[in-house]
Amino acid sequence: MGKVGVYFQEWQTTVKRNQAALDRVDSLKQVEIKKTDLKQFRNVNQTIKRFNQALNELKDQTINETQQLIQLGLNKQNDDAQYGK
């Protein structure tokens, strides 16, 4: 079996890059529809609101998971130092 290890700086950069990509996704803006009888447009703002809520929840979850993944990489680096690669 080959050696297992981590290059912490590379690990951290990759994890943070993925979080930053999600941070660039913007919320949708509410639209103003004066009057319509088209069923698919009647609840468009509710759909936008639900999308924005889901996006914000995903961003919050990603922040937490990014911190956990960085800690995981740091723990692996410390294990490598303690037990050798």
Image: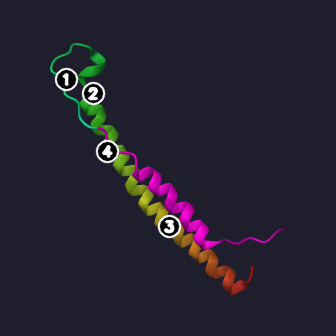
Q: Which of marks 2 and 4 is nearer the N terminus?
A: 2
Q: Which mark is residue 68?
A: 3
CA distance for labels 1 and 3? 43 Å
Q: Which residue is drawn at 45% across and 56% down?
A: 20
Q: Residue furthest top?
A: 37
Label 3 secondary element: helix
Left or right: 15, with 52 as reference point? right
Residue 70: x %, y % from top left: 53, 69
The question of residue 27 being in magenta is answered with: yes
Q: How crowded is mark 3: few (under 14 residues within 10 Å), some or many (20 or more)?
A: few
Q: Up-down: is 49 above or below 14? A: above
Disc 1 to disc 4, C-alpha distance = 21 Å
The range drawn in magenta is 1-28
- Magenta includes 66? no
Q: Which amino acid does label 3 sit on?
A: Gln
Q: Earlier in the sequence, mark 2 or mark 3?
A: 2
Res. 53 mark: 4
Label 1–label 4 contact, CB within 8 A: no
